[in-house]
């Protein structure tokens, strides 16, 4: 039995709302089919960088008039930097989520699906027309890059943390005995303080 089967087999123990929160939308559902190690936010970030590097082949080649001596090295270096940056951002998101214990948030589809295509159009348009200012290229690249880190930070990294906890036989939606004990102690302290103030007006 794979790790995916392990955590999926425990979903029946959760409420419908919790199951929907863990399973997420179509994109998250596809990533969750991977083993937890391969679906770590670091690798998802690197995968997004890899996809972007393939797409950027066209703008880089067109800008250099398809002379391989001009664009091959610059494309390779830029793609490597992009892949490294996005994988590091994925790892950072994972650590932030572990500290904050934040739950997944649905990212608008217009950000996930439309922004990269709009960025590619702007980038290609700015390369093909000389009168377009250089900041248009930067805008196109930003629109292509930022949806990946935003999705990982808001949606996938929190969801991956929940999957990891479930894989470890921990219910992330249930208070632990330690938390309940600490809450009881805080309540007792409040009651004792209130009693002392009442006895000593």
Image (cartoon, rainbow, N blue to C red):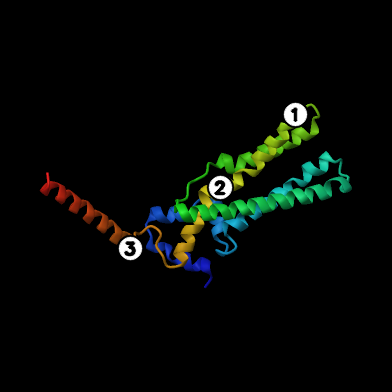
Read off the residue under disc 2.
Answer: 151
Q: CA distance from mark 1 to mark 3?
A: 59 Å
Q: x, y (%) of residue 196?
A: 15, 50
Name the residue at the top extreme: 131
Where is mark 3, residue-wise?
178
**Comparing labels 3 and 2, the label whose residue is closer to the camera:** 3
- Residue sitting farthest toward the front: 200
Looking at the rendering, which quadrant does residue 35 occupy? Answer: bottom right
Q: Would you call the spot at circle 2 few (<14 residues within 10 Å), some (14-19), or many (20 or more)? A: many
Pointer 2 or 1: first along the chain: 1
Q: Secondary structure at mark 2?
A: helix
- Residue 104 falls left or right of residue 111: left
- Residue for badge 1: 133
Report the residue at 74% width, 45% height from top: 56
Q: Is residue 116 left or right of residue 30?
A: right
Q: Secondary structure at mark 3?
A: helix
């Amino acid at each position: 039995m794979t790790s995916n089967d392990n955590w999926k087999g425990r979903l029946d123990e959760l409420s419908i709302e919790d199951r929907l929160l863990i399973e997420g939308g179509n994109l998250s559902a596809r990533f969750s089919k991977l083993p937890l190690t391969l679906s770590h936010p670091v690798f998802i970030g690197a995968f997004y960088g890899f996809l972007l590097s393939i797409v950027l082949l066209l703008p880089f080649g067109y800008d250099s008039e398809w002379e391989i001596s001009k664009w091959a090295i610059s494309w390779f270096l830029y793609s490597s930097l992009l892949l490294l940056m996005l994988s590091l951002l994925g790892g950072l998101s994972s650590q932030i989520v572990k500290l904050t214990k934040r739950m997944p948030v649905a990212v608008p589809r217009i950000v996930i699906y439309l922004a990269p295509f709009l960025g590619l159009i702007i980038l290609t348009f700015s390369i093909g027309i000389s009168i377009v200012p250089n900041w248009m290229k930067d805008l196109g690249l930003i629109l292509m890059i930022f949806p990946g880190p935003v999705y990982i930070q808001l949606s996938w990294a929190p969801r991956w943390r929940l999957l990891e906890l479930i894989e470890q036989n921990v219910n992330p939606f249930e208070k632990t005995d330690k938390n309940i004990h600490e809450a009881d102690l805080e309540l007792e302290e409040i009651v004792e303080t209130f009693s002392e103030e009442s006895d000593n007006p």
